[in-house]
Image (spheres, rainbow, N blue to C red):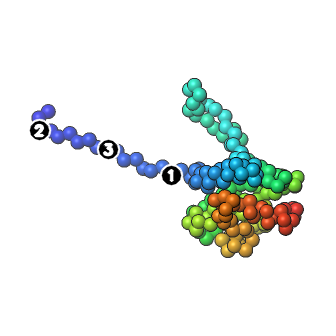
Amino acid sequence: MKGVIRLRVQKTRKPVVNYGGRGMAFEELLEWVNQAYEGKQIATIEKIPTPISIIRSEGSRIKDAVFSKKSSVDYTGTYRSRPIWYDAKSTQIDTSFPLDFVEEHQVDRLIRHQSNGAICFFLFWFTKLDRYYLMLLPIFLTYWQRRNDGVRGCKSIPVAEFEKNAFLIGKTSRGLLDYLAAVDHIIDAGADNKH
C-alpha cells in the first residue's frame, strides 16, 4: 500500500525475577574455594546435588525436570579426619539474616550429622556488606528455637549477633575465602564437641 508506513512495534517483556538463584554466586565461590582446598590436599569438600526426576528429555539434554525430594544441605566433606556438613546462605539485607531462608529439613539433617560427630555449621554471606560468617550449628539453634517458640522479634539474626557469636571469614593465603581457618579454631578449641 502506497503512503502507509509500517512500524514494527517490539513488545517489551516484564523482567522475570529469579529468587531461586540468589545464592548461586556464593555457591560458585565456595566451589572454587573447595577445589583449591582439594588441589592443595587440605580438605575434600563436595557439593551435594539436589535430586531431580526427569520429566522430558531429548537425547542427552534434559528438557523438563522437577525436584524429586527436598534438597539436603549444600556441602559435605572431610577435614583433619573430621566429617564436615554445612549449608551456605546469602542475603542482600544488610541488617539481619531472615530465618525463613533456612528450611526445617536442612536444620534436621545438620542436627543428625552433628549427633554422630560431624562438625556442622552455616556459612552466611551478607552481599551488601561483603561479609562472610561461619556460625556453628549449636549457636544457630538458639536463634532457630526462639523463632520456633514464637519469641517476638526473633524472625531473623541481626548482624550484631553474627559479630558476637560467629566467625568472620577472611581472605587468607590458603584460599580466597578461607572458612577452614575458622574450622581449625573450632577443632583446636574443642568447640565442635559441644552438641
Residue 38 on image: x %, y %: 72, 49
Residue in the image at 83% along x and 62% along y: 187
Q: Which residue is mark 1?
A: 17
Q: Which residue is mark 3?
A: 10
Residue 8 on image: x %, y %: 26, 41
- Amino acid type at circle 3 is Gln
Left or right of 66? Residue 76 is right
- Amino acid type at circle 2 is Gly
Image quadrant where residue 189 sits: bottom right
Q: Is residue 5 visible?
A: yes
Task: Kindly indicate whether the residue at mark 1 contacts the one at mark 2 (C-beta within 8 angstroms).
Answer: no
- Above or below residue 60? Residue 82 is below
Which element is circle 1 on? loop
- Residue 3's tag is 2
In which quadrant of the rendered image does the N terminus lie?
Answer: top left
Which element is circle 2 on? loop
Residue in the image at 88% along x and 62% along y: 193
Dot 3, how many residues are within 10 Å of its Cα: few (below 14), some (14-19), or many (20+)?
few
In which quadrant of the rendered image does the C terminus lie?
Answer: bottom right
Count of picture labels:
3
How many angstroms separate mark 2 from mark 1 (CA)? 43 Å
Dot 2, how many residues are within 10 Å of its Cα: few (below 14), some (14-19), or many (20+)?
few
How many angstroms separate mark 3 from mark 2 (CA)? 22 Å
